Amino acid sequence: MDAPAVSHVEVSGNPCRVWSKGSGRRIGFLAGFGGLPKWIPFLDALATENEIVVPSIPGFPGAVGHTSFDSHIDWVLAIRDLLKQSGLLDGAPLIGSGPGGSLAADMAAFWPGEINRLALIAPWGLSDGDAPMADPWARRPHEVGPLLCNVPQHWDELKAEPEGANSVEWPIEQARALEASARIFWPLGNTGLAKRLGHIACPTLLIRGEGDQVIPANYMEAFRAGTGGETTIEAIANAGHLAELDQPQAVADAIRAFI
């Protein structure tokens, strides 16, 4: 894979990496649990016909500053700044996975005129006491891959330090990403998003891996029922919670067809 272009923007005085690759219609992507320490095949699949822009959420790999935010509205405003500086609030379609999916949904709810289309891969943000989402922070390191991916090796490969890198920063960066998502979504992913879904007016695609062990299937139905615009659900076979890791081409194809 050719490397993406790398730039940086400032959010609350802290640098956040922005990757970009491809040409054509600009679309944005907010990463899932654990962030993106590496460029992944899913992004290459999207970049074949579009310009894919990937800003790093504060605290996720490629960005810092996650300790600056004390409330969910602080996070929402920070993500808006991040997207605006990355050129993604001019009607561009926005994709989000897991935590990034919840934040993308909030962007479309708070500022409905700035998001053209919304594609969400197993978004967080909802809560059901009778069927709670799984708690990835409570898992031991060797249990996280099997929880998140249909093929655990896909998670291990994403998080493995590149051969020969030998950087003391690598494990710190991965631990920081887990802390950042906990700051946004503790306890168990509930941000009160259900109260705001009715403000989402743009067409929305919900994607869920059929083997998702984190987000129950009824969450997708609740999300669809709550939105104010046209919302469809697509299941991806042989994929877990991070469907973009397990089935990058199938997920990219579904999103390209939608946008």
Image: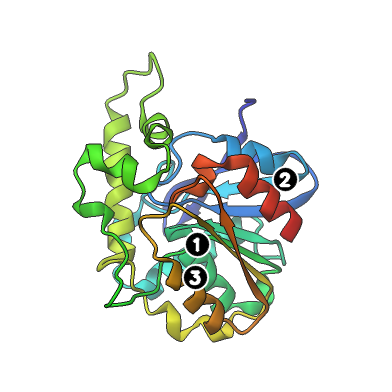
Q: Are marks 1 and 3 in contact (CB under 8 Å)?
A: no
Measured along the vertical axis of the image, is residue 85 above or below residue 127?
Answer: above
Amino acid found under the numbered disc labelled 3: Met
Q: CA distance from mark 1 to mark 3?
A: 12 Å
Measured along the vertical axis of the image, is residue 135 above or below residue 147?
Answer: below
Q: Earlier in the sequence, mark 1 or mark 3?
A: 1
- Please provide percent x and percent y for residue 211: 44, 52
Residue at (29, 60) in percent of width and height: 134
Amino acid found under the numbered disc labelled 1: Gly
Q: Nearer the viewer, residue 147 or 170?
A: 147
Q: Earlier in the sequence, mark 3 or mark 2?
A: 2
Residue at (32, 31) in percent of width and height: 170
How many C-alpha atoms fall within 10 Å of the one at disc 3: few (<14), some, or many (≥20)?
many
Q: Which mark is residue 101?
A: 1
Q: Is residue 4 left or right of residue 47?
A: left
What SS does tag 3 mark?
Answer: helix
Q: Which mark is residue 220?
A: 3
Residue 227 in view: yes
Amino acid found under the numbered disc labelled 2: Glu
Q: CA distance from mark 1 to mark 2?
A: 19 Å
How many C-alpha atoms fall within 10 Å of the one at disc 1: few (<14), some, or many (≥20)?
many
Residue designated by label 2 = 51
Q: Are marks 1 and 2 in contact (CB under 8 Å)?
A: no
Q: Are marks 3 and 2 in contact (CB under 8 Å)?
A: no
Chosen colour scheme: rainbow
- Please provide percent x and percent y for residue 27: 68, 54
Q: Which mark is residue 40?
A: none
- Please provide percent x and percent y for residue 168: 27, 26
How many C-alpha atoms fall within 10 Å of the one at disc 2: few (<14), some, or many (≥20)?
some
Query: Quarter of the image holding residue 19?
Result: top right
Q: Is residue 33 left or right of residue 137?
A: right
